[in-house]
Amino acid sequence: MSSDDLKRQAALEAAKLIEPGMRLGLGTGSTAKHLVDALGAMVADGLKVVCVPTSEGTRKQAESLGIPLTTLDETPELDLTIDGADEFDPSLRLIKGGGGALVREKIVAVASARMVVITDVSKEVPVLGRFPLPVEVNPFGLESTRRQILKVLNAAGHDCPVVLRRTPTGGVYVTDGGHYILDCPLGQIADPEALSMALFRVPGVVEHGLFLGLAKAVIVADDTGLRIIGNPA
Ligand code: 5RP
């Protein structure tokens, strides 16, 4: 099965958690896209839900499928968010932000009673850090902020570059919030909680891609079937 087929399997399993009347957070990325497609079909069949998208891309997809949308200002508390991830470890700690939506993804996840992650097995790691950690920063003072982040990483034992994310055509990648992203290929993160706090102490850091203590469950698809880690209910 292709990686995309596995992502679809995980998404379809997660769609079974959706109940009438729910307030949902909709993730971003190729795995979440399958979930939104499945939800669109459920809505077409008469399911009543309201949803907050975590990116403009997901908003457009949901709108095209007729999925009713709301905002966190109108609906500040959500029942369930279903989203993908770039990595997860045995404690269900995540790295997210490969798709650049980490700020909205984290705000929506925190506003939700439950966050369930959907992935193919390639995202499973014993220790976080194989995927470069995205750090979203204010464009003002970019180079100073980059150097401060480098100092934080060096102090935590990481000798790695801090790389400004670019678009495929070479322009600077700009997030939905108008910020930039610095990608940090850390290798292995010994203490994600400590690194999280240290990064937040750098002025200019808007958010980072460590999602700690947020995922209640991960639905993982591999060639042998589905595995559910944690409790999605
Ligand atoms: C977007 C994300 C995505 O959830 C993450 O990048 C996984 O993407 P995909 O489902 O395409 O593998 O964090 O910011």
Image (cartoon, rainbow, N blue to C red):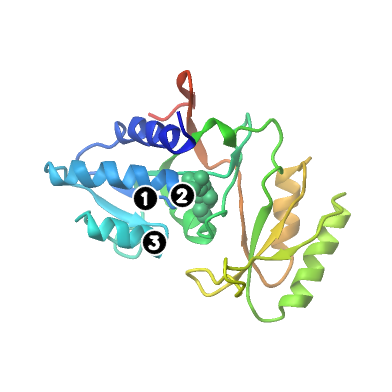
Q: CA distance from mark 1 to mark 2?
A: 7 Å
Amino acid of disc 1: Gly
Residue 32 in picture, x, y percent from top left? 40, 46
Residue highlighted by disc 1: 25
Q: Nearer the viewer, mark 2 or mark 3?
A: 3
Tell whether circle 1 marks a residue whose Cβ is less than 8 angstroms from ligand 1.
Answer: no
Q: How many marks?
A: 3
Residue at horizontal 37 percent and vertical 50 percent from the top:
26
Q: Nearer the viewer, residue 187 or 140?
A: 187
Mark 1 lies on a secondary structure that is: strand
Q: Quadrant of residue 161?
A: bottom right
Dot 1 or dot 3, earlier in sequence: 1
CA neighbours of label 1 inside 10 A, class few (<14), some (14 to 19), many (20+): many
CA neighbours of label 3 inside 10 A, class few (<14), some (14 to 19), many (20+): some
Tell whether circle 3 marks a residue whose Cβ is less than 8 angstroms from ligand 1.
Answer: no
Residue highlighted by disc 3: 57
Mark 3 lies on a secondary structure that is: helix
For the question of whether residue 62 can be seen, the reply is yes
Amino acid of disc 3: Gly
Q: CA distance from mark 1 to mark 3?
A: 14 Å
**Above-or-below relation of 140 to 19:** below
Q: CA distance from mark 2 to mark 3?
A: 17 Å
Mark 2 lies on a secondary structure that is: helix
Quadrant where the N terminus sits is: top left
CA neighbours of label 2 inside 10 A, class few (<14), some (14 to 19), many (20+): many
Residue 11 in picture, x, y percent from top left? 37, 36
Kindly indicate whether the residue at mark 2 contacts the one at mark 1 (C-beta within 8 angstroms): yes
In this picture, residue 111 sits left or right of residue 201: left
Residue at horizontal 57 percent and vertical 40 percent from the top:
213
Kindly indicate whether the residue at mark 3 contacts the one at mark 2 (C-beta within 8 angstroms): no
Residue highlighted by disc 2: 109
